Amino acid sequence: MISPFSDLIPKKLTDDSVDEAVKSVTNPSMPYYSRILVALFANEGNQLSDYTFDIDPSTSAQAPSPYALFHTSKTQDTITRVFQRHGGIHLETPLLMPKNAFQPLPPDTVTMLDPNGELLLLPYDLTLPFARYLARTPNIESLRRYTVNKVYRKRPGDGQPLQPRECDFDIVDSVSGNMLADAEVIKVVCEVFEAFGSVAERGYTIR
């Protein structure tokens, strides 16, 4: 019989010791960090997750109906025509971006880890990716850009992130303090609302 005070009984882990262990294995400078990443990404997953990953528990439908897809397409076409009337050029930006300490993130931002241990973000909005694009291409002095695309929100639990759509119309101008661009963006928003008669009839306020 082993005494309860015997050295053969493993000691109970405390919260502090667990925290220290977590800090150790997640430190990129540790020699075994890359081995941990290799082991994580070697996981083949399981059949249940593969089946349930695309199921949305918040709705009874597993995919939008053809009727809903048709109206989504018509809505996007209507908005796009307004953007193009104002000289907008369709421009998409890279999907992923690295996480950094300079950009505060909403709690429902979708983050992920790549095989090299780099923390990456899916776009929370369409503004930050475009700002990064402009920072990498300083030779752009004038541009009217639009995009209609998905943004991402973390879903409670497992599965696909929430994927609402947003539209952006941006005017890049090298003239400092030019308020004409701001006025034109407001005009673009008004024209978008006016393009949908039911919205215009109910009235709207731009803030």
Image (cartoon, rainbow, N blue to C red):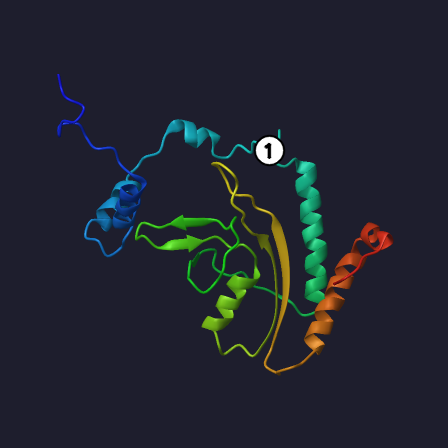
Helix, strand or loop at mark 1: loop
Give the labeled residue for mark 1. 58
In the image, residue 91 sits, relative to residue 164, either above or below, namely below
- Is 3 on the left-hand or right-hand side of 38? left
Q: Position of residue 145 (x, y in %)?
A: 61, 67
Q: Position of residue 200 (x, y in %)?
A: 83, 55
Q: Position of residue 185 (x, y in %)?
A: 70, 68
- Which quarter shows the N terminus? top left
- Which quarter shows the C terminus? bottom right
How many numbered discs, if any?
1
Q: Residues within 10 Å of mark 1 (few under 14, many from 20)?
A: few
In the image, residue 163 sits, relative to residue 177, either above or below, namely above
**Residue drawn at (79%, 53%), measured in percent from left and top?**
196
- Dividing the picture into quarters, in which one does residue 57 lie? top right
**Residue drawn at (74%, 67%), measured in percent from left and top?**
186
- Is 104 on the left-hand or right-hand side of 198? left
**Residue drawn at (29%, 45%), measured in percent from left and top?**
22
Foreground: 198 or 98?
98
Foreground: 17 or 153?
17
